[in-house]
Image (cartoon, rainbow, N blue to C red):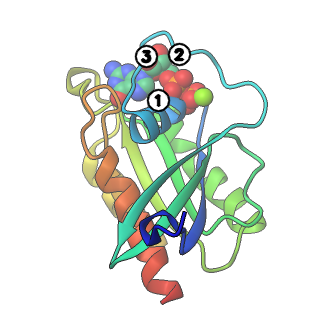
Amino acid sequence: YGDPSQKTDYVFKVVLIGDSAVGKSQILARYARNEFSLDSKATIGVEFQTRTLVIEHKSVKAQIWDTAGQERGAVGAMLVYDITKRQTFDHIPRWLEELRGHADKNIVIILIGNKSDLENQREVPTEDAKEFAQKEGLFFLETSALEATNVETAFLTVLTEIFNIVN
Ligand code: GDP
Ligand code: MG
């Protein structure tokens, strides 16, 4: 009790969206628990996990939802595709439209090309995604939940931007 480091200054709701099997649940498992599973099951029901971090001496609790349809109240979104499946990238405009229709107008969005460890199976050139992100005003990173590449950076990018907007 009374420990100021225990108090939460902000709670930011962030949603993970994108096609099935692109790695949303594993990105969240990596970020929230530093875990990864190769035989991850499809997500059933409503699920979120939290991780608390400190930004500019303030305690920020990220409440991260891993289910489509949870956009209401979200201040951040990670729009995920699989760099080895072109189709999952081609569906991104639809996910974006869905997101912009249901979420807060000022929602911070990052486009994420996951499974960057599978470079030899790549179907989506980095440049295509970069160009799309630029055109739509999104942040962009390629990640690997398996190798833990850029997962931390992706969340930090979104959460820091949200923090800067509310401060
Ligand atoms: P979701 O349906 O978007 O939640 O996808 P999952 O997180 O369940 O992942 C689908 C499959 O892709 C699982 O077999 C994961 O182990 C695998 N996977 C997820 N992320 C990565 C990654 O970064 N690299 C590789 N090689 N496999 C991944
Ligand atoms: Mg899932």
Tell me the number on the disc at residue 40. Answer: 2
Q: Position of residue 163 (x, y in %)?
A: 46, 78
Indicate whether 70 appears above or below 147.
below
> In the image, is the residue at mark 1 within 8 Å of ligand 1 by its beta carbon?
yes
According to the picture, the residue beneath numbered tag 1 turns out to be: 26
Real-space CA distance between mark 2 and mark 3, rounded to the nearest whole angstrom: 5 Å
Q: Amino acid at mark 1?
A: Gln
Answer yes or no: disc 3 within 8 Å of ligand 1: yes
Residue 120 percent location from the top left of the image: 20, 21
**Which numbered dot is residue 37?**
3
Q: Residue at x 68, y 60 (%)?
A: 99
Q: Does residue 84 appear in this view?
A: no
State the SS at label 2.
Answer: loop
Query: Mark 1 or 2 closer to N-term?
Result: 1
Q: Residues within 10 Å of mark 1 (few under 14, many from 20)?
A: many
136 and 142: which is toward the camera:
142
Q: Residue at the top extreme?
A: 39
Mark 1, secondary structure of its residue = helix
Of pointers 1 and 3, the one earlier in the residue sequence: 1
Disc 3 packing (10 Å; few <14; some 14–19; many ≥20) = few
Residue at (38%, 43%) from the top-left corner? 113
Circle 2 packing at 10 Å, graded few (<14), some (14-19), many (20+), is: few
Q: Position of residue 22 (x, y in %)?
A: 50, 31
Residue positioned 72% across, 67% down in the render:
103
